[in-house]
Image (cartoon, rainbow, N blue to C red):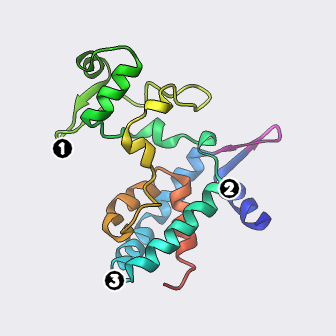
Amino acid sequence: MTRVKSLLVDRYSLVVKGISAMDLNRFKEISRNKSEENRKFLQRLKNRDTRKVDDAFHHLHEEVFEEINCLDCANCCKTTSPIFYQADIERLARGMRMKPGEFISKYLKIDDDHDYVLTSSPCPFLGLDNYCAVYEDRPKACREYPHTNRKKMVQITELTIKNTMVCPAVLEMVERLKKITL
């Protein structure tokens, strides 16, 4: 465990004055360099036993999130927007004591897929300390991110490929998954 943890620190971290922090520029470079290899690997998983793929991903999800703290990174909140469903909009608006229409006008736009997404990034609810100001009311997509502990992972390989470019934990799971015989 210590050896693996130190690899993670070496691979994706930056140590400044003795404090380890996520080096997102280094992560971006590594994820870009591995993107085609990861795409091919994840596409091949579609031909594997779904239960074995799920079991492996779920095990790695638990293992990697024991080692990586999202608060050291928050790259998802800094670079991407979740989809906001009507229930999310209503819950967030209620929590902020706004009308849903006001919430939409202030924070959201409709994207090319006709989904509500944030008008800007980083997320306006992300604090300088990487904590979410609306954590208890956050959208469903944020609650479920990075989607590596769900069933039928082979059905979301395209999403997983994209998430290797956003989330160091997902990239690490895929790298470890390559070493497992399924």
Residue 133 image point, x, y percent? 51, 25
Kind of residue sitting beneath label 3 = Asn
2 or 3: tag closer to the N-terminus: 3
Q: Is residue 119 above or below residue 43?
A: above
Which SS class for mark 3? helix
Q: Pointer 3: residues within 10 angstroms few (<14), some, or many (20+)?
A: few
Q: Relative to 7, is 38 on the left or the right? A: left
How many angstroms separate mark 3 from mark 1 (CA)? 29 Å
Q: From where the camera sits, is residue 118 visible? A: no
Kind of residue sitting beneath label 2 = Glu
Total numbered labels: 3
Which SS class for mark 1? loop
Kind of residue sitting beneath label 1 = Asp
Residue pointed to by mark 3:
47
Q: Which region shows up in magenta? A: 15-22
Q: Pointer 1: residues within 10 angstroms few (<14), some, or many (20+)?
A: few
Q: Is residue 129 above or below residue 12?
A: above
Quarter location, residue 95 = top left
Q: Which mark is residue 67?
A: 2
Instruction: Choose between 39 and 133: the one closer to the eye.
Output: 133
Q: Main secondary structure of the magenta part?
A: strand
Q: Are marks 2 and 3 in contact (CB under 8 Å)?
A: no
Residue pointed to by mark 1:
113
Q: Pointer 2: residues within 10 angstroms few (<14), some, or many (20+)?
A: some
Examine the structure image and report whether residue 64 is included in the region drawn in magenta.
Answer: no
Residue 27 image point, x, y percent? 56, 52
How many angstroms separate mark 2 from mark 3 (CA)? 30 Å
